[in-house]
Image (cartoon, grey):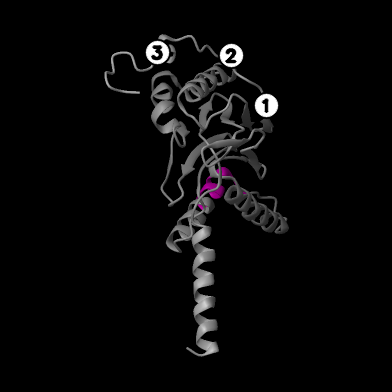
């Protein structure tokens, strides 16, 4: 094999290895839970960043405003979320440059994110996130999600990750259309507490964000009151003969 062929082969192998390394998530965040309440949208996420199965980072903010009317939450790969925020900054800057008195609403931002995620999925180079997008514009509340392969929908309450299994049933039972801000926060805290008990990637340091016609408010980090004296926690294998 001559040097040119060897160089080409090395180049091909190098590019393949480089692309392969980007296909696996490294630092990830767990579930996002969001719901509509009487005046707007509430969204909750903890601040843990897991390096594999190790809870490495404890102050990762996963709730961010997106323009004037939208709020974005993300689970999954943190660096991919940062890339998505960069895309949104460029989109909103371009929209503002028109200076026509209009601004992107949550439905437009959600549609844009859906196209981005599906486009990257078709290139076999997905952005490894599940996104929740909520907002209020002209009195209309909007809440939707999009997965890493572009699956998307709107609903009165949405979740990502383990929240789909553990929090969504609670929301189906207890959510109603005229939920007050205080009751909405209590419902989100109940969901986050269940996730903390059952999801190994969850930590007891969370933020709750609110978006209304007046804008976005993101709470400082705080911890939930918990109780670990349940009998199932103290003796988890009772009645399970032969288990660990």
Residue 221 marker:
1
* Near-viewer residue (238 or 197): 238
Cβ atoms under marks 3 and 1 closer than 8 Å: no
- Residue labelled with disc 2: 225
- Magenta stretch contains residue 226: no
Q: Secondary structure at mark 1?
A: loop
> Decide: marks 2, 1 in contact (CB < 8 A)?
no
Q: Does residue 108 belong to the magenta stretch? A: yes
Dominant secondary-structure state across the stretch colored magenta: helix
Of residues 15 and 86, which is closer to you in this image?
15
Residue 55 spot, x, y in % from top left: 58, 34
Which tag is nearer the camera, tag 3 or tag 1? 3
Binning the other alpha carbons within 10 Å of mark 2 as few (below 14), some (14 to 19) or many (20 upward) gives few
Q: Which tag, 3 or 1, sits closer to the chain's start? A: 1
Q: Secondary structure at mark 3?
A: loop
Q: Which residue is mark 3?
A: 235
Question: Helix, strand or loop at disc 2?
Answer: loop
Mark 3: few, some, or many residues within 10 Å (few <14, many ≥20)? few
Q: Residue at x 63, y 30 (%)?
A: 209
**Would you say 235 lies left or right of 136 here?**
left
Q: Nearer the viewer, residue 205 or 147?
A: 205
Residue name at image x 45 percent, y 56 percent? 118
Q: How many marks?
A: 3
Q: Which class describes the residues within 10 Å of circle 1: few (<14), some (14-19), or many (20+)?
A: some
C-alpha span from label 2 to label 1: 14 Å
C-alpha distance separating marks 3 and 1:
32 Å
Residue 106 horizontal/vertical position (percent):
56, 43
> Where is residue 4, by image quadrant?
bottom right
Tell me the number on the disc at residue 53. Answer: none
Which portion, as a residue range, is magenta?
104-111
Quarter of the image for residue 78 reads top right
Q: Identify whether 91 is placed above or below 145.
A: below
């Amino acid at each position: 094999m001559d040097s040119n062929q060897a160089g080409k082969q090395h180049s091909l192998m190098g590019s393949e290895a480089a692309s392969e390394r980007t296909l696996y998530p490294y630092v990830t965040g767990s579930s996002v839970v969001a719901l509509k309440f009487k005046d707007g949208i509430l969204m909750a996420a903890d601040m843990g960043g897991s390096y594999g199965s190790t809870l490495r980072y404890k102050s990762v903010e996963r709730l961010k405003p997106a323009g004037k009317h939208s709020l974005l939450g993300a689970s999954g790969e943190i660096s991919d979320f940062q890339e998505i925020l960069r895309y949104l900054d460029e989109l909103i800057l371009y929209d503002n440059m028109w200076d026509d008195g209009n601004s992107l609403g949550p439905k437009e931002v959600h549609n844009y994110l859906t196209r981005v995620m599906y486009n990257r999925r078709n290139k076999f180079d997905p952005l490894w996130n599940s996104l929740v997008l909520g907002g209020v514009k002209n009195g209309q509340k909007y809440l939707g999600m999009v997965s890493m392969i572009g699956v998307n929908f709107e609903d009165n309450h949405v979740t990502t990750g383990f929240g789909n299994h553990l929090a969504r049933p609670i929301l189906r039972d207890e959510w109603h259309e005229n939920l007050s801000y205080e009751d909405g926060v209590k419902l989100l805290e109940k969901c986050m507490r269940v996730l903390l008990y059952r999801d190994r990637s969850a930590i007891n340091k969370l933020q709750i964000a609110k978006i209304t016609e007046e804008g976005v408010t993101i709470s400082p980090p705080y911890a939930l009151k918990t109780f670990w004296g349940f009998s199932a926690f103290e003796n988890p294998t009772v009645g399970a003969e032969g288990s660990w």
